[in-house]
Image (spheres, coloured by chain):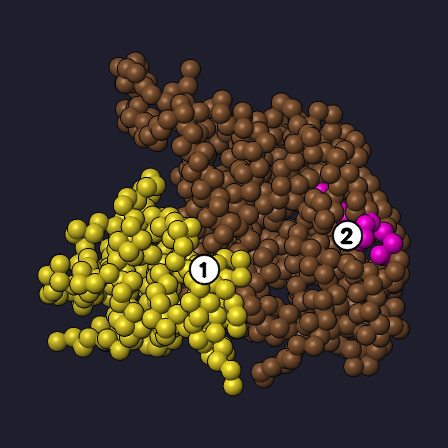
């Protein structure tokens, strides 16, 4: 049978029927910027960082199935400009202070900002009031950094079978909540062993008493830019660290 | 107020029983719970989640999504002013200030005695008889200073809503021009009998011949939708097809579905039944916007009557094997639910977030079954076609836009109301008919539609020229088109579901930009920002809401640039932060407003 292919920035990319543009690109070692996508979970297409132009239309590459002969634009100045603007939106929407963040160097939002040469947040900051939740014995939740990617929501619901996390509110007031009447993580059945404890692409879900184990400067995205880390992005699945 | 579990059980068990403890009816369960408890206390959410076997966080997430659900205590009287630009032009802002002042109340806060709260809400669909508001969900029209004063007395005396003057709650149809639909005398059930006589294939053929296109705005060919759902396979344990009537008429300035629902409900239910007969559906669902809740008792009584007379239920009109019934779901204040996949999510008891498409609802809709979602007006038109045939319908209007269109006309006109025209009518003709003397602009299709300036009034209402879902808002020469656009910018920021980054953040950024310009701190910089965000939202948003959200700004910036430019402080950048304005809260707290409490050269204060 003929190998199905589509053109990604002029390069032929093979794919199997049913694969999304993102899946096929990752398999071919081609980087499409993304935040809410994770190969282990059902794609939802909400961060819109992976927006590409397929047959002239803007689509989310993580939810759009590839079609034979399709022409897809990915790494273009126009699309990267749009992605940079959306990154800036995510930065001003929350409270992101990279220098003081435990996730600095391991954070996808920060790594993408470097990758796409975002030099300033550009827009006025929203400075939302998002108190941290330190109630849980093993885990700190710093909502200030939440980008609403729903990876913890999906992991807790689909893998852990617990539904510890969900979203409430709408529009700019949309926010992450936990599954307890008190609103405190300590009153849920969340555990550091949960898959959901290890999927946050930014610095919301943090293990307590384990700060800066690897010095800043020697971390994942310090070593190599995110755009050259297709292996680590594709194999994010198995890296559950068992707590001491 | 504490809610112990005994009292909660007393209140909630009958509601849960009535809704069969079905998690897909969560929105309805929350609505009825709030009816009894006045808000949704945390303990009630916990109780409902446990009984429906849902994660509590999911129930809380749904409660937090809809504007009309309250998770904190609210006033005994909850007053929401319709905040469409049309209501504002009729003086709603001044009336709200008057009410707040008289009640010693700050907008958005509950009075200290827990008696009353006053706030705004998105357009309530009364543009032809505004300014309008909702009191505890009941619509009140024709607000005036006199009515405000009387309302204050009623509230202070704690008069129950049922004893308020009945004329407050009158909603008129205001039908000003009738064409085939509104002028016709359509006997109840005739369309169903005609459809049965024709047979489903023949009805579909007539629908194709009619070239009827969806009246909700997108203009998709109805026959194609029906045919796709008809041939799509059902699946699972409960294989069914569904007809969903989109009565979530949330587009600011639109109210034609309100009139159809109140005076032509039989035609609508006939149309739904015809659609069900044609595609092989057995269940119809009406998604009625929360603002039109006052229509619910009459609609339910109508459905009950139809069951008694054999127009609904088993063997409809005596046709063995054709079973069809209709249920009504009430929305709870979310414009985005007018998008068909968010509407389906909401029908399933979830947050009204648009789904990823494909798959489309015709293949995988309500409960993942083949589902046709049609607008109220579309279904009424389908009923006519079942009776009169497709050729008759196609002979009306234009070739690409057959039939007639109901327009909801409001704003600076002598006779606001419903006008039915064959497609192809010119804007000028409509303006003449409704008595718009000095129009400088018309916003067609609501906030997400297009703004036409005077030189474009020779255009025609038709899918191939100026498409519309029905809103037709007229702005006289004395109106400030910047304020029109600013109102719409805030509307979209309020109604964004927040699912995708560009719309969630972009609509708020744009609203802030417009406020900055309105505060006299705007510059050319903000104008370029608006254009940049417009391009991003248009390209990258998940659904039509985000894609269209900047349209009114784009149009007015292109056509009414002076309305913006006369506000710009300079053509260079100005910071949004204004030191003197930032001291306002300190002045308020200390009760000072003397010159020494102000900075000398306060920037940003307009002369």
Q: Is residue B393 visible?
A: yes
Residue B246 percent coordinates (x, y): 65, 58
Q: Write down which chain is painted brown.
A: B
Residue in the foreground of this view, choosing between B377 and B402: B402
Which quadrant of the structure image shows residue A179? bottom left
Which of the chains bears the disc numbered 2?
B
Classify 10 Å Cα crowding around label 1: few (below 14), some (14-19), many (20 and above).
many
Query: Distance from label 1 to label 2 (Cα)?
Result: 35 Å
Residue that appears at 26% across and 78% down: A238
Q: Residues within 10 Å of mark 2 (few under 14, many from 20)?
A: many
Question: Based on the displayed image, in which of its 4 quarters is residue B145 positioned?
Answer: top right
**Which residues lie in the magenta part?**
B393-408
Question: Secondary structure beneath disc 1?
Answer: strand
Residue B396 inside the magenta-drawn segment: yes
Residue B135's spot in the image, x, y percent?
57, 43
Residue B309 shows in this picture: no
Q: Is residue B294 above or below residue B43?
A: above
Residue visible at 19% across and 65% down in the picture: A220
Mark 1 vs 2: CB contact within 8 A: no
Q: Position of residue B136 (x, y in %)?
A: 56, 47
Using the image as rendered, state which of residue A78 and residue B301 is in the foreground.
Answer: A78
Viewer-nearest of discs 1 and 2: 1
B145 to A125, vertically: above or below: above
Chain letter behind tag 1: A
Label annotation for residue A73: 1
- Chain A representation colour: yellow
Helix, strand or loop at mark 2:
loop
**What residue sits 50% from the left and 62% below the top?**
A54
x then y, percent, for residue A86: 38, 51
Where does label 2 land, which residue?
B401
């Amino acid at each position: 049978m003929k190998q199905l292919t589509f053109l990604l920035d002029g390069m032929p990319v093979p794919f199997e029927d049913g694969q999304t543009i993102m899946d096929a690109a990752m398999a071919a070692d081609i980087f499409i910027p993304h935040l809410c996508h994770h190969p282990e979970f059902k794609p939802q297409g909400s961060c819109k960082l992976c927006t590409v132009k397929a047959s002239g239309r803007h689509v989310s590459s993580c939810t759009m199935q590839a079609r034979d002969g399709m022409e897809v634009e990915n790494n273009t100045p126009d699309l990267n400009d749009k992605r940079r603007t959306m990154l800036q939106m995510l930065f001003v929407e929350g409270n992101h202070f990279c220098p003081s963040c435990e996730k600095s160097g391991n954070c996808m939002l920060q790594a993408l900002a470097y990758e796409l040469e975002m030099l300033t947040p550009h827009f006025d900051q929203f400075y939302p009031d998002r108190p941290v939740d330190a109630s849980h014995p093993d885990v700190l939740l710093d909502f200030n950094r939440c980008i609403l990617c729903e990876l913890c929501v999906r992991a807790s619901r689909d893998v852990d079978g617990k539904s510890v996390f969900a979203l409430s509110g709408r529009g700019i007031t949309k926010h992450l909540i936990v599954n307890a009447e008190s609103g405190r993580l300590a009153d849920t059945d969340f555990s550091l062993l949960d898959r959901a404890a290890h999927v946050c692409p930014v610095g919301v879900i943090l293990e307590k008493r384990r700060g800066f184990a690897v010095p800043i400067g020697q971390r994942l995205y310090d070593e190599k830019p995110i755009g050259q880390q297709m292996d680590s992005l594709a194999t994010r699945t198995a890296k559950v660290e068992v707590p001491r | 107020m504490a809610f112990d579990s005994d009292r909660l059980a007393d209140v909630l068990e009958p509601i849960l029983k009535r809704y069969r403890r079905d998690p897909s009816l969560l929105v309805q369960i929350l609505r009825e719970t709030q009816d009894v408890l006045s808000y949704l206390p945390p303990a009630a959410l916990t109780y409902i989640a446990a009984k429906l076997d849902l994660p509590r966080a999911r129930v809380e997430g749904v409660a937090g999504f809809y504007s009309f659900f309250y998770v904190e205590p609210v006033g005994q009287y909850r007053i929401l002013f319709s905040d469409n630009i049309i209501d504002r032009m009729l003086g709603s802002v001044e009336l709200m200030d008057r009410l707040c002042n008289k009640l010693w109340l700050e907008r958005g806060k509950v009075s200290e005695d827990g008696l009353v709260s006053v706030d705004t809400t998105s357009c309530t669909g009364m543009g032809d008889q505004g300014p309008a508001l909702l009191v505890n969900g009941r619509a009140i029209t024709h607000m005036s200073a006199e009515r405000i004063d009387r309302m204050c007395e009623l509230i202070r005396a704690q008069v129950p809503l049922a004893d308020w003057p009945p004329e407050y709650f009158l909603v008129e149809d205001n039908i000003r021009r009738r064409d085939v639909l509104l002028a016709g005398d359509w006997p109840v059930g005739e369309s169903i009998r005609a459809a049965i006589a024709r047979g489903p294939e023949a009805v579909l053929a007539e629908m194709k011949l009619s070239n009827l296109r969806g009246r909700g705005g997108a203009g998709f060919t109805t026959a194609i939708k029906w045919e796709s759902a008809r041939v799509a396979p059902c699946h699972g344990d409960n294989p069914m097809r569904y007809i969903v009537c989109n009565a979530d008429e949330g587009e600011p300035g639109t109210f034609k579905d309100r009139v159809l629902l109140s005076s032509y409900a039989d035609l609508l239910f006939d149309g739904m039944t015809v659609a069900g007969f044609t595609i092989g559906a057995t269940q119809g669902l009406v998604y009625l916007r929360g603002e039109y809740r006052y229509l619910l008792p009459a609609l339910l009584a109508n459905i009950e009557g139809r069951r008694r007379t054999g127009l609904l239920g088993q063997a409809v009109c005596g046709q063995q094997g054709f079973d069809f019934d209709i249920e009504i779901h009430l929305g709870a204040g979310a414009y985005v639910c007018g998008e068909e996949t968010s509407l389906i999510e909401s029908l399933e008891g979830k947050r009204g977030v648009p789904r990823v498409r494909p798959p489309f609802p015709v293949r995988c809709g309500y409960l993942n079954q083949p589902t046709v979602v049609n607008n109220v007006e579309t279904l009424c038109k389908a009923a006519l076609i079942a009776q009169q045939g497709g050729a008759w319908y196609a002979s009306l209007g234009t070739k690409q836009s057959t039939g007639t269109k109901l327009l909801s006309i409001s704003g600076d006109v002598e006779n606001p109301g419903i006008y039915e025209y064959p497609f192809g009518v010119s804007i000028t003709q409509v303006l003449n008919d409704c008595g718009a003397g000095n129009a400088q602009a018309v916003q067609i299709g609501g906030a997400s539609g297009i703004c036409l300036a005077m030189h474009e009034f020779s255009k025609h209402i038709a899918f191939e020229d100026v498409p519309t879902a029905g809103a037709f808002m007229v702005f006289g020469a004395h109106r400030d088109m910047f304020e029109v656009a600013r109102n719409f910018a805030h509307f979209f920021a309020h109604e964004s579901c927040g699912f995708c980054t560009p719309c969630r953040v972009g609509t708020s950024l744009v609203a802030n930009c417009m406020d900055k310009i309105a505060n006299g701190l705007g510059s050319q910089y903000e104008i370029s920002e608006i254009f940049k965000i417009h391009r991003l939202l248009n390209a990258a948003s998940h659904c039509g809401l985000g894609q269209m959200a900047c349209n009114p700004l784009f149009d007015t910036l292109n056509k009414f640039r002076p309305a913006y430019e006369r506000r710009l402080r300079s053509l260079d950048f100005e910071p949004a932060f204004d030191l003197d304005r930032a001291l306002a809260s300190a002045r308020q707290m200390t009760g000072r407003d003397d010159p020494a409490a102000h900075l000398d050269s306060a920037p940003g204060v307009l002369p």
